[in-house]
Structures are given as C-alpha cells and as structure tokens.
Image (tube, helix red, strand yellow):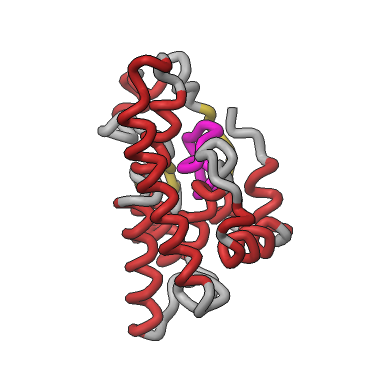
Amino acid sequence: MIDLYAWNTPNGRKISVALEEMALPYRVKPVDITQGQQHEPDFLAISPNNRIPAIVDPEGPDGAAISVFESGAILLYLAEKTGRFLPEDRRTRVAALEWLMWQMGGFGPMPGQVHHFLGVAEKDRAYGLTRYLNETRRLYGVLDRRLAQVAYVAGPLSIADFAILGWVWRHERHQVDLANYPMVERWYRDLMDRPAVARGFAVPLS
C-alpha cells in the first residue's frame, strides 16, 4: 500500500485523484502545513524540498521501496508503474508531457500567487494581485483554446488532466468564473463526474 503524504491543496488532490483513477491502494498520512509539519526531519527525509505531496511505495522498482517527491514526478512514476494515463503513442505522449509541464511551470505557480496576494493587506497587494490575476486568466484562456480542439488536454485522458484539475478545482479562489471559459467548464464537469475523481476529492487529506 502506497503512503500518500499530503494536505488538502491542489497539489495534494492531483495525487489522490490519480491514485483513485489508477485503482492503487493507498493510505493518507496528513502533513499539516499550517503547523509546519512539512519541516519535520522525518518528512524531510522523504521530501527534501519540504513540500507536499510525497509518496512512499513499498513495492517500487525491482521490488524495493521508493519515495517520490514533487507532484509531477509522482504522477509520472504512478503512470509508469501502472501503465495507465500516459499514452504509448509517442506523439500523444509528447502532448501529455507538454501539458503536464505547462501545469507545473505556470498553471500552479501563477494561481498560487493569487492565493498569496489575496491574503495580503489591501494596501500591499494591488500590484501583485493584478499581475497574477491577469496571468492566471490568460492561462485559463490557453487551456480553453486547447480544450476546444480535444476532449482532454493530450487527447486521451492522462496524468496531465489530473495535474491541471487540482488547480481548476480552486477556480473560485482564483476569482475565475468558469462560465467565461466554456471549454474548461465542460472538461471540469466531465472530470468531476467520474467516480474515481469524486473519490479522490472526497478522501480526507487534512
């Protein structure tokens, strides 16, 4: 059984959704980031960047245990372990990797800055909040245009969708109305209607 070290955040939800979709047995080990548990030595041994999520798989490569940190690396590891949600066709696989990296490099860091500046005192937040809201909305537009062409970001359902879903889940916190991005809204509703995705969001992470 895989141990999932996580908290109720977009990056944590990426992994709980993927584990459910892949039908892998797991148990949650909450890491309360509001209390600084991510800085404790035992967790540092698993996640050297002091960030959730992380996993420990007792049945890793060659049957030996392995720990994996960084949500994108975890998704790739799980996809390769199960042979699911990472297309075998090389061209389609490139698309899945492109959109996974798009999420990791932009559609995560930018909305994350929106989360930060919404919590800053009004007098200190205007420039930063405007900057990151505009970029977040631009990224929603990029995603909307892509989803006007395909059902899922790589064509078939893939780990890239799970990665992006964790952040679209927080669209209200981003101050984004999905009605302005109808293709994203269609994709989001389709994914949230999947039983395994629903289980992935229902499992307590905190």
Image side of residue 202 versus residue 15, left or right: right
- Residue shown at 48% from the left, 26% from the top: 31
**Residue 54 seen in this snapshot:** no
Looking at the figure, which quarter contains the C terminus?
top right
Given residues 81 and 127, the one toward you in this image is 127
Residue 150: image x %, image y %?
A: 52, 78
- Residue shown at 55% from the left, 41% from the top: 170
Given residues 80 and 71, the one toward you in this image is 71
Q: Is residue 180 magenta?
A: no
Q: Residue furthest left?
A: 48
> How many labels sit on residues?
0
**Residue 70 seen in this snapshot:** yes
> Which quadrant of the view contains residue 202?
top right
> Where 56 sits versus 144, above or below?
above
Residue 102: image x %, image y %?
A: 34, 59
> Where 26 sits versus 18, above or below?
above
Q: Is residue 13 magenta?
A: yes
> Where 37 sits versus 15, above or below?
above
Residue 85: image x %, image y %?
A: 50, 69
Given residues 74 and 91, the one toward you in this image is 91
- Residue shown at 68% from the left, 59% from the top: 189
Image side of residue 198 versus residue 110, left or right: right
**Residue stretch rendered in magenta on the structure:** 1-16
> Where 42 sits versus 162, above or below?
above
Residue 185: image x %, image y %?
A: 62, 60
> Which quadrant of the view contains residue 124?
top left
- Residue shown at 34% from the left, 68% from the top: 97
